[in-house]
Image (cartoon, rainbow, N blue to C red):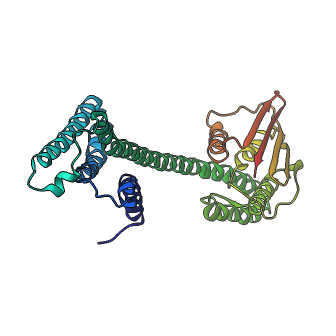
Amino acid sequence: MHITKKGLLKFLIHSILWVFFYGLLLYPFITQERPIPPDLLVRLLLATVIFYINYYYLIPKILLQKKTVNYIVMSAVLLIICGLIVNLFNSIIALSVENPAIQEHNLRPELPEFRRWFMSVITFGIPFVISSLLRIYIEWKRNEDVRKIIENEKVNSELQFLKTQLNPHFLFNSLNAIYALSVKKSPNTSESIINLSELMRYMLYEADKDLVPLSKELEYIKSYVQLQRLRLSDSENVSLKISGEERNKAIAPLLFISFIENAFKYGTDFKGKTNVKINLSIFTESLHFSIINKIGVFQKEPSNSGVGLQNIKNRLNILYPNSHELFVENDGENYCVRLTLKL
């Protein structure tokens, strides 16, 4: 029979509880070398029965099924039956006058009645309460673990869904850039295709990871900006500035690309002039990202353009809860995004 770590831990906990409980009640008799009363042994045996009936049946099958009244009634009946068994046992011993040894250890008639009930409360009540608390805690812990698993699966599913939306969004924008070059028969077309293949390779092999080296993410951004520069007739006002130490730092992949895509898409006017300023400042425990683009004249944002931006907001809430600050400003002439992340 295979014993799991969980099963072994459960066995050890129960063993420790019973050793402590039995030792607490039997210790005075053992240390004083007094005979152990037979009725005490009966109480201990019944206490064990009460513990496991409550632990394995009454709590999970009755109380946790929201049958509170039934639980109270059945618990009371169980305790009363055990009490009657002890009284019956004492009565039988009291009548066993033929055996002086047994009669000597019997609960003496002169023993106060409250003492008898106190012994019952101790021997029956403590195991009942401990079994209730232990089982309720175990069930709560199990439900909490299941809830966390479901929550993690939900978060992972949502992240995967957001990434599946992000990839085609990126691909459409990049193909549009290459198409523009091919229409103009630009000599940069072949270079842009190679550039795109590098970008797609990054998305294929790195995007599914929880974290990637910050240096790789920055190289990805540089490649994308270079791809956009190749297609633009005027890229003089396109800038990418990175400052700070990027080594030994990690970040969730593809956090900035949606902001950058939208800046190039809506920051180009009808004359083909683009004004996009990207700044990345890396600090010891944080990263500051900002991007500003001129809003192109006569540029009207289509209804599906917010998909990438909404996706990145959702991803930030999942990946960096309470660890990011995002500000988006639109004054009619400039569109500005500022994002601060705790690394």
Residue that appears at 41% across and 59% down: 16
Compare residues 222 and 124 and report the one nearer the observer.
Answer: 124
Residue that appears at 81% across and 32% down: 297
Q: Is residue 201 above or below residue 145?
A: below
Q: Residue 199: horizontal and vertical position, in percent?
A: 69, 61
Left or right of 269? Residue 34 is left
Residue positioned most to the right: 236
Q: Residue 243: horizontal and vertical position, in percent?
A: 89, 55
Quarter of the view holding residue 335 = top right
Q: Residue 295: horizontal and vertical position, in percent?
A: 81, 34
Left or right of 53? Residue 193 is right
Q: Residue 250: horizontal and vertical position, in percent?
A: 73, 59
Is the N terminus in the top left, top right, bottom left or bottom right quadrant? bottom left
Q: Is residue 152 above or below residue 269?
A: below
- What is the total number of numbered labels drawn onto the structure image? 0
Residue that appears at 64% across and 50% down: 172
Compare residues 218 and 46 and report the one nearer the observer.
Answer: 46
Quarter of the view holding residue 195 = bottom right
Compare residues 214 and 39 and report the one nearer the observer.
Answer: 39
Left or right of 203? Residue 138 is left
